[in-house]
Amino acid sequence: MTGNRTFTMIKPDAVEKGYIGAILQKITAAGFKIVAMKYTQLSQRDAETFYAIHKERPFFGELVEFMTRGPIVAAVLEKDNAVEDFRALIGATNPADAAEGTIRKLYASSVAENAVHGSDSDENAGIESNFHFAGREIF
Ligand code: GDP
Protein backbone atom coordinates (compact mmCIF):
# COMPACT_ATOMS: atom_id res chain seq x y z
CA MET A 1 0.00 0.00 0.00
CA THR A 2 1.34 3.45 -0.82
CA GLY A 3 0.78 6.44 1.44
CA ASN A 4 -0.70 9.77 0.52
CA ARG A 5 1.73 12.10 2.28
CA THR A 6 5.27 13.22 1.72
CA PHE A 7 7.62 15.76 3.26
CA THR A 8 9.56 18.46 1.42
CA MET A 9 11.99 21.28 2.11
CA ILE A 10 12.76 24.17 -0.20
CA LYS A 11 16.48 24.35 0.53
CA PRO A 12 18.59 27.45 1.34
CA ASP A 13 19.88 27.87 -2.25
CA ALA A 14 16.37 28.11 -3.69
CA VAL A 15 15.16 30.42 -0.90
CA GLU A 16 18.19 32.71 -1.46
CA LYS A 17 17.42 32.91 -5.18
CA GLY A 18 13.77 33.86 -4.61
CA TYR A 19 12.29 30.60 -5.93
CA ILE A 20 9.84 29.84 -3.07
CA GLY A 21 6.81 31.07 -5.02
CA ALA A 22 7.75 29.36 -8.28
CA ILE A 23 8.44 26.04 -6.56
CA LEU A 24 5.21 26.11 -4.54
CA GLN A 25 3.37 26.88 -7.78
CA LYS A 26 4.86 23.77 -9.43
CA ILE A 27 3.96 21.67 -6.40
CA THR A 28 0.33 22.76 -6.23
CA ALA A 29 -0.09 22.67 -10.03
CA ALA A 30 1.00 19.01 -9.89
CA GLY A 31 -1.92 18.25 -7.58
CA PHE A 32 -0.28 18.27 -4.16
CA LYS A 33 -2.20 19.82 -1.29
CA ILE A 34 -0.12 21.62 1.34
CA VAL A 35 -1.26 20.27 4.73
CA ALA A 36 1.44 21.93 6.88
CA MET A 37 4.11 24.51 6.06
CA LYS A 38 6.66 26.69 7.84
CA TYR A 39 9.51 29.09 7.06
CA THR A 40 12.38 28.27 9.39
CA GLN A 41 16.13 27.75 9.68
CA LEU A 42 17.81 24.50 10.68
CA SER A 43 20.32 24.53 13.52
CA GLN A 44 23.50 22.48 13.21
CA ARG A 45 21.94 19.85 15.44
CA ASP A 46 18.70 19.80 13.40
CA ALA A 47 20.60 19.25 10.15
CA GLU A 48 22.85 16.56 11.66
CA THR A 49 19.80 14.74 13.01
CA PHE A 50 17.72 15.09 9.86
CA TYR A 51 20.56 13.79 7.64
CA ALA A 52 21.97 11.27 10.16
CA ILE A 53 21.59 8.52 7.55
CA HIS A 54 24.35 10.26 5.53
CA LYS A 55 26.78 10.79 8.40
CA GLU A 56 29.40 8.42 6.99
CA ARG A 57 29.28 10.00 3.53
CA PRO A 58 32.24 12.22 2.56
CA PHE A 59 29.94 15.17 1.88
CA PHE A 60 28.16 15.11 5.27
CA GLY A 61 29.95 18.21 6.61
CA GLU A 62 29.24 20.17 3.43
CA LEU A 63 25.61 19.05 3.49
CA VAL A 64 25.11 20.24 7.08
CA GLU A 65 26.85 23.55 6.33
CA PHE A 66 24.68 24.10 3.26
CA MET A 67 21.40 23.20 4.94
CA THR A 68 22.05 25.53 7.90
CA ARG A 69 23.31 28.57 5.99
CA GLY A 70 19.93 30.21 5.52
CA PRO A 71 16.17 29.80 5.83
CA ILE A 72 14.20 26.92 4.37
CA VAL A 73 10.53 26.16 3.79
CA ALA A 74 9.40 22.83 5.29
CA ALA A 75 6.06 21.34 4.25
CA VAL A 76 3.92 18.24 4.39
CA LEU A 77 2.18 17.46 1.10
CA GLU A 78 -0.81 15.27 0.33
CA LYS A 79 -1.69 13.44 -2.87
CA ASP A 80 -2.32 9.84 -3.90
CA ASN A 81 1.04 8.05 -4.27
CA ALA A 82 2.69 11.14 -2.76
CA VAL A 83 6.27 9.91 -2.22
CA GLU A 84 6.78 8.48 -5.69
CA ASP A 85 4.94 11.25 -7.54
CA PHE A 86 6.86 13.95 -5.67
CA ARG A 87 10.24 12.31 -6.42
CA ALA A 88 9.21 12.33 -10.10
CA LEU A 89 8.22 16.01 -9.87
CA ILE A 90 11.56 17.06 -8.32
CA GLY A 91 13.80 14.94 -10.58
CA ALA A 92 17.19 13.30 -10.04
CA THR A 93 19.47 14.33 -7.16
CA ASN A 94 21.93 15.83 -9.65
CA PRO A 95 20.12 18.47 -11.75
CA ALA A 96 22.38 17.57 -14.68
CA ASP A 97 20.58 14.19 -14.74
CA ALA A 98 17.10 15.54 -13.95
CA ALA A 99 14.37 15.32 -16.58
CA GLU A 100 13.17 18.44 -18.40
CA GLY A 101 10.48 20.32 -16.50
CA THR A 102 11.38 18.88 -13.09
CA ILE A 103 11.92 21.26 -10.17
CA ARG A 104 15.61 20.39 -9.87
CA LYS A 105 16.16 20.80 -13.61
CA LEU A 106 14.55 24.25 -13.44
CA TYR A 107 15.85 25.58 -10.12
CA ALA A 108 18.84 23.55 -8.86
CA SER A 109 22.46 24.38 -9.59
CA SER A 110 24.41 21.28 -8.50
CA VAL A 111 24.17 17.87 -6.85
CA ALA A 112 24.80 19.58 -3.51
CA GLU A 113 22.63 22.68 -3.97
CA ASN A 114 19.64 20.97 -5.48
CA ALA A 115 16.79 23.28 -4.43
CA VAL A 116 14.40 20.78 -2.84
CA HIS A 117 14.16 17.72 -0.62
CA GLY A 118 11.62 14.95 -1.11
CA SER A 119 11.17 11.93 1.18
CA ASP A 120 12.30 8.64 -0.33
CA SER A 121 9.78 6.32 1.38
CA ASP A 122 6.48 6.43 3.25
CA GLU A 123 8.33 5.55 6.44
CA ASN A 124 10.76 8.44 6.05
CA ALA A 125 7.93 10.79 5.06
CA GLY A 126 6.39 10.08 8.46
CA ILE A 127 9.66 10.43 10.36
CA GLU A 128 10.62 13.67 8.55
CA SER A 129 7.15 15.21 8.96
CA ASN A 130 7.21 14.46 12.66
CA PHE A 131 10.71 15.90 12.95
CA HIS A 132 9.44 19.27 11.72
CA PHE A 133 5.80 19.28 12.80
CA ALA A 134 5.61 17.07 15.90
CA GLY A 135 2.72 17.99 18.11
CA ARG A 136 0.66 19.52 15.31
CA GLU A 137 -2.99 18.50 15.14
CA ILE A 138 -2.68 16.90 11.70
CA PHE A 139 -0.38 14.21 13.03
P1 GDP B 1 18.05 12.92 -2.57
O1 GDP B 1 17.25 11.85 -1.89
O2 GDP B 1 17.75 13.03 -4.05
O3 GDP B 1 17.97 14.25 -1.88
O4 GDP B 1 19.60 12.47 -2.53
P2 GDP B 1 20.49 11.76 -1.39
O5 GDP B 1 19.63 11.18 -0.31
O6 GDP B 1 21.45 10.87 -2.10
O7 GDP B 1 21.36 12.96 -0.80
C1 GDP B 1 20.81 13.86 0.15
C2 GDP B 1 21.30 15.25 -0.16
O8 GDP B 1 22.71 15.31 0.05
C3 GDP B 1 21.13 15.70 -1.61
O9 GDP B 1 19.82 16.13 -1.90
C4 GDP B 1 22.16 16.80 -1.73
O10 GDP B 1 21.70 18.04 -1.16
C5 GDP B 1 23.29 16.25 -0.85
N1 GDP B 1 24.30 15.56 -1.67
C6 GDP B 1 24.15 14.42 -2.39
N2 GDP B 1 25.30 14.09 -3.02
C7 GDP B 1 26.19 15.07 -2.69
C8 GDP B 1 27.56 15.31 -3.01
O11 GDP B 1 28.20 14.55 -3.76
N3 GDP B 1 28.14 16.42 -2.46
C9 GDP B 1 27.48 17.27 -1.64
N4 GDP B 1 28.13 18.35 -1.13
N5 GDP B 1 26.19 17.08 -1.31
C10 GDP B 1 25.55 16.00 -1.83
Image (spheres, grey):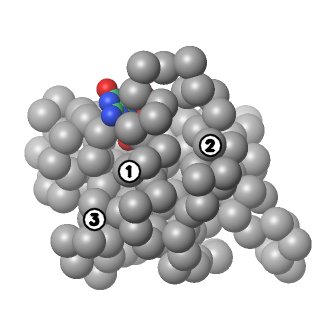
> Who is closer to the viewer here, 10 or 25?
10
First of labels 2, 3 by sequence position: 3
Mark 2 highlights which residue?
48
Residue 68: x, y in percent? 47, 58
The amino acid on which the numbered mark 3 sits, given as a three-letter code, is Ala
Mark 3 highlights which residue?
14
Question: What is the secondary structure assignment of the residue under circle 2?
Answer: helix
Using the image, determine if residue 21 lies above or below residue 2: below
As measured in the structure, the alpha-carbon distance from the residue carrying label 2 to the one carrying label 3 is 20 Å
Q: Residue visible at 18% across and 58% down?
A: 107
Check residue 66 in the rendering and tell me which mark sits there, or answer none. Answer: 1
Foreground disc of the pair 3, 1: 1
Question: What is the secondary structure assignment of the residue under circle 3?
Answer: helix
Mark 1 CB near ligand 1 (8 Å cut): yes
Q: Residue visible at 53% across and 70% down?
A: 41
As measured in the structure, the alpha-carbon distance from the residue carrying label 2 to the one carrying label 1 is 11 Å
- Residue 87 in sight from this viewpoint: yes
First of labels 2, 1 by sequence position: 2
Q: Could you tell whether 41 is left or right of 17 in the image?
A: right
- Ligand 1 image-quadrant field: top left
The amino acid on which the numbered mark 1 sits, given as a three-letter code, is Phe
Q: Are marks 2 and 1 in contact (CB under 8 Å)?
A: no
Question: What is the secondary structure assignment of the residue under circle 1?
Answer: helix
Mark 2 CB near ligand 1 (8 Å cut): no
> Who is closer to the viewer here, 53 or 26?
53
